[in-house]
Amino acid sequence: MSRLQASRRHSVRFALNGKPCDGEAEPRLMLTDFLRHQVGVTGTHVGCEHGVCGACTVSIDGRPARACLTLAVQVDGCEIRTVESLAPSASRLGILQSAFKRNHALQCGFCTAGILMSLDCFLREHERPDERAIRDVLSGHLCRCTGYAPIVRAALEAAAELADRGKETADA
């Protein structure tokens, strides 16, 4: 492939947090950079850029995915959800976010967006997870501030609240 072919931009269309989104991306542009710099959605953080830390986790078609390992052109036609989708409005936090706040489950907050997205995807499929299952989900994330105990408490609390509300979605 010539340098000219590699630098051509491709049209990318997808749903972002329930709304149509489109733009152009070079073939090697990562989804993190596309979301942050071209779309202006900055809740998805760029950490290690190797898929290890989990700060860049988003939901692609309902499954958690590392946006730093996903090319923007790969999400054409997909449904993408970022941490911005979790709050029902600008003035109200979602259930999972509120549980994080109550349990002091964040400190610097850098890892929080990715953790929230992984937990959101998980809680949509697991109504009453136990601590071990939550810790398994968190094993894909690096947090250097909280020690994970408050995150586990927040996730369990949110799961119980969601189950009590009759299987509402995690962003209700």
Image (spheres, rainbow, N blue to C red):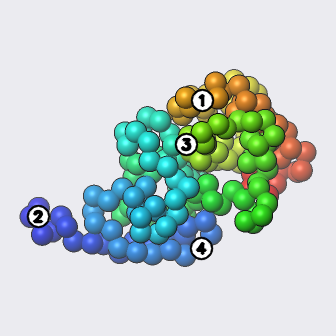
Q: Secondary structure at mark 2?
A: helix
Say if residue 167 shows up in the picture.
Answer: yes
Q: Secondary structure at mark 4?
A: strand
Report the disc number at residue 94.
Answer: none
Q: Position of residue 128 (x, y in %)?
A: 80, 36
Q: Quadrant of residue 52?
A: top left
Q: Residue at x 76, y 54 (%)?
A: 94
Q: Quadrant of residue 169?
A: bottom right
Q: Extreme left residue here? A: 2
The amino acid on which the numbered mark 2 sits, given as a three-letter code, is Arg
Q: Which sits earlier in the primary sequence, circle 4 or circle 3?
A: 4
Q: Residues within 10 Å of mark 1 (few under 14, many from 20)?
A: few
The amino acid on which the numbered mark 3 sits, given as a three-letter code, is Phe
Q: Which sits earlier in the primary sequence, circle 1 or circle 4?
A: 4
For disc 4, the marked residue is 19
Residue nearest the viewer, comparing 65 with 154: 154
For disc 2, the marked residue is 3
Q: Position of residue 101 (x, y in %)?
A: 76, 43
Q: How many marks?
A: 4
User: Residues under labels 1 and 2: Cα distance?
Assistant: 43 Å
Report the disc number at residue 145.
Answer: 1
